[in-house]
Amino acid sequence: MTPSELLKEVLKYKSFIAKGGITATGGEPLLQPEFLKEFFYLCRQEGIHTTLDTSGFIYTPETLAVLEFTDLVLLDIKSIDSAMHQELTGVKLENTLRFLDYLEEKEIDTWIRHVIVPNYTDDDIQLETLAEFVKKYAVIKKIELLPYHTMGIDKYEQMGLDYKLKEIEPLSAERLANAKKIFGIR
C-alpha cells in the first residue's frame, strides 16, 4: 500500500476521527520513515492530527524528517538506567534521549510512556530518577505509567518466540499507586 492508498482508507473514517486523528504505532513505525513522512504529510494536508508512537531509538535524518509532519509523539522510555534499558530493549538509551532533546528543540508535544515491570523498572530510585529527569522538558504534556501485564505471553508462544518475562507477575495496584505518587500523577 502506498501512503496515498492508506490516506484513501483513512478518509473513509474522517468524520469518526475528526476529534482525534491517526496514530502510527508498531513495532517501530520509524523503520519506514519515508513512507511515514509522506503519509503524515498527506494527513496534514487533510487536517488530520498525527501521532507517532515510538521508542525514538532510530535517530537518523530520515526519521527526524517525519517529525516535520507530526503533531504529537508518544515516546516510550523503558528505563532511565542505561544498562537496564540495554537489557530490556537490546538498544542503547542514548538515541531515545537524543530524540527527546530533538522534540524539545522542535517544540513537538510529547507524552512519555513508561512500562513498570516488577524486578526491572519497579524500583523507587529508578522511578524517582526518571520523574526528575523528565521535569526539564517543556514539551512533555503527559506521563503515562503503564503497569506490566502478562497478556503478551500467548502471542509469543503462538509465534514460537521465547517470552523473556514469563516468570514475572503483573504489577500490583499498590506499586502502580506508588509510582504515580512519585511522578505526582493522580
Image (spheres, rainbow, N blue to C red):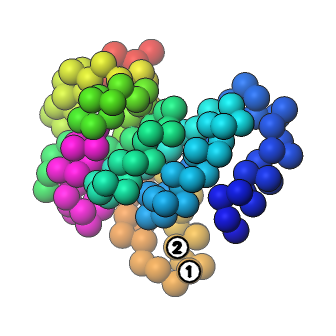
Residue 131 visible in image: no
Mark 2: few/some/many CA within 10 Å (<14, 14-19, 20+): some
Q: Nearer the viewer, residue 149 or 71?
A: 71
* Mark 1, residue position: 159
Q: What residue do we see at 76% from left, 29% from top?
A: 18
Q: Which mark is residue 156?
A: 2
Q: Quadrant of the C terminus?
A: top left
> How many numbered marks, from 0 up?
2
Coordinates of residue 139 in the picture (x, y in percent): 35, 23
Vertically, is 102 above or below 54? Answer: above
Tag 1: amino acid: Met
Coordinates of residue 179 in the picture (x, y in percent): 33, 28
Which range of residues does the magenta coloring cover?
84-100
Tag 2: amino acid: Tyr
Q: Secondary structure at mark 2?
A: helix
Q: Main secondary structure of the magenta part?
A: helix
Mark 1: few/some/many CA within 10 Å (<14, 14-19, 20+): few
